[in-house]
Image (spheres, rainbow, N blue to C red):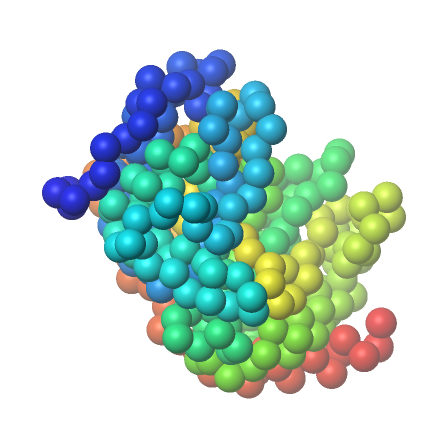
Amino acid sequence: MDNSIPHLKHPEKLCYPQDAITRKDVLDYYLAVSGPLLRFCRSRPLTQIRYPDGIESKGFFQKNPPSGAPAWLETWPVEGTRYIMLQDQRTIAYAIGLGGLEFHISPLRYPDAVHPDLAWVDLDPMPPFGFDEAVKLARLTLTALDAIGMRALIKTTGKRGIHLFMPILPGPTPHELFLALKGLGMELRRVRPELVTLERAKAKRHGVYFDFGQSAAGHTLAAPYSLRAAPGAPVSCPIAPEELPHIRPTDFTLRTVPLRLRAGRDAWAAGIAAQDPAPLLRLAALASHG
């Protein structure tokens, strides 16, 4: 553990009142998962969602460091915002001391503020569809990516959906990735129209929303191993492809995920080398047809 971790303010405060989970419990969780969390998130702009009075009170997004931030805090100015970067355990502890609960990351990595090194999609099932249908679309998407020679990292969202992260060589702009992933979604919808929706308006969606829009500039997604602000303290947890048919979102919580890691089950430990995005970018041509 980093000996320079700052003193935690109000460790007894309840963050998840229904589960009797305190701010100290939240910090202990994040320190327990800090190895894989920092390995993936270090040098990326951080957006935290703060719940100073727990999840039953209104939370708010924080990008710029607040006034009085310590001099050691590493930041990165991107398009007018000075983002905190989640570099080490003391930054984690500082964020938790502010009431930080959820960590969301950008697909950018310092020092390139223009070209993402991640392409990603959010598979969000629309009721009455649920997690089982998100799994079906995740497996269909992985098959489609495999057909063009690309791979993706998989994680639960911590809610009812699934995130797919594709490490890529920097080069495409966010808009180019937006069009490429829209093209991929259109092809998936052609194959399974009853399962896949691309409708931006919630009232028109059905099945599982293939949210390609998350690759647009300025968007973020929950970091791997981030807690989510919901009863039970769910976690957005990395999983292996072979786990998809056997898991439920409720399997991954503040209490269970550290045990999973201690058992050697860090699904993203091997990672995926940065991939040539060209095969994905070729799908952008499909986006012009709808």
User: Where 255 sits versus 75, above or below?
Assistant: above
Does residue 248 appear anywhere in the picture?
no
Q: Identify the residue at horizontal 46%, vertical 58% (top origin).
A: 83
Looking at the image, which residue is at 40% across and 14% down? 20
Position of residue 155 measured from the top left corner of the image (x, y, whole percent): 47, 49
Expressed as whole percent of the image width and height from the top left, the position of residue 280 reads 59, 78
Whether residue 50 is visible, yes or no, is yes
Q: Nearer the viewer, residue 215 or 268?
A: 215
In the visual, does 78 lie left or right of 211?
A: left
Image quadrant in which the N terminus is located: top left
Left or right of residue 58, residue 170 in this image: left
- Give the camera-side residue of 128 and 192: 128
Q: Viewer-proximal residue, 5 or 131?
A: 5
Total count of labels:
0
Looking at the image, which residue is at 47% across and 67% down? 77
Of 220 and 279, nearer the camera is 220
Against 91, residue 142 (above or below) is below
Q: Residue at x 49, y 24 (%)?
A: 54
Q: Left or right: 159 with respect to 3?
A: right
Q: Is residue 256 above or below residue 74?
A: above
The picture quadrant where one finds residue 68 is top left
Please identify the quarter of the rendering in which residue 87 is found.
bottom left
Quadrant of the drawing holding the C terminus: bottom right
